[in-house]
Image: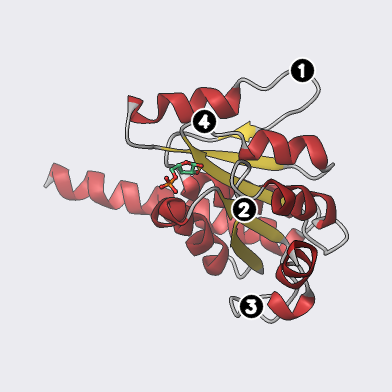
């Protein structure tokens, strides 16, 4: 029965309605309690019109699903995995150990230690198994980093990233000028 449930979860039919295209980025997280943080990565991907999927995959509570997800991601067309977790945040590192895809880790601030526990759990990977770790709760940067990575082989996406950077600069300059007045 477990096998059937795992198969259903990772089948084409289970692709959610975030986009009609096959997901290029997989956003996964250890718990639904991570969702308020992790949805910021989804916002960025929506803005850049990059197809993505968003799923709960727990290293500790659903290890079989984590294994299956990581093993199948590449053949399902996923190119980058963004993985968020808090506390004993093993998800990004374990997924990175199971796939050749780039993994971006988002340390989620859990109830204690202000997220330092999550950050260290994700960033202190052993040599040979990299996880690109962003700041605590900064799923926005995980989304932006994934767009930059895809931009290496996608000229259109890369030029939209340049535009985003110019817009960000102009916004800050406008604020600076307003303060001067
Ligand atoms: C981790 O434990 C999750 O990633 C989450 O950040 C943290 C707490 O999970 P819940 O107890 O809220 O489900 O696995």
Q: In front of the other: label 2 or label 3? A: 2
Instruction: Label 4: state its secondary structure.
Output: loop
Q: Residue tagged by mark 1?
A: 127
Q: How is the image coloured?
A: secondary structure
Direction from residue 128 to residue 87 in the image, left or right: left
User: Which numbered tag is attached to residue 19?
Assistant: 3
Ligand 1 under 8 Å from disc 4 Cβ: yes
Q: Residues within 10 Å of mark 3 (few under 14, many from 20)?
A: some
**Nearer the observer, 14 or 104:** 14
Question: How many angstroms separate mark 4 from mark 3 (CA)?
Answer: 32 Å
Asked if marks 2 and 1 touch (Cβ < 8 Å), the reply is no
First in residue order: circle 2 vs circle 1: 2
First in residue order: circle 1 vs circle 3: 3
Instruction: Label 3: state its secondary structure.
Output: loop
- Rendering coords of residue 5 (x, y %): 72, 68
Ligand 1 under 8 Å from disc 1 Cβ: no
């Amino acid at each position: 029965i477990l096998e059937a449930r795992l198969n259903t979860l990772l089948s084409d039919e289970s692709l959610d309605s975030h986009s009609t295209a096959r997901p290029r980025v997989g956003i996964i997280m250890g718990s639904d309690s991570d969702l308020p943080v992790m949805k910021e990565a989804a916002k960025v991907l929506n803005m850049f019109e990059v197809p993505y999927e968003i799923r709960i995959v727990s290293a500790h509570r659903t290890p079989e699903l984590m294994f299956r997800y990581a093993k199948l991601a590449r053949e399902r067309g996923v190119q980058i995995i963004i993985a968020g977790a808090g506390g004993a945040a093993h998800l990004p590192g374990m997924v990175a150990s199971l796939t050749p895809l780039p993994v971006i880790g988002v340390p989620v601030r859990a109830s204690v230690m202000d997220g330092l526990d999550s950050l260290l759990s994700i960033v202190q990977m052993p040599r040979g198994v990299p996880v690109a770790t962003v700041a605590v709760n900064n799923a926005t940067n995980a989304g932006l980093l994934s767009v930059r990575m895809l931009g290496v082989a996608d000229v259109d996406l890369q030029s939209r990233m340049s535009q985003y950077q110019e817009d960000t600069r102009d916004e800050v300059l406008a604020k600076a000028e307003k303060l001067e007045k």
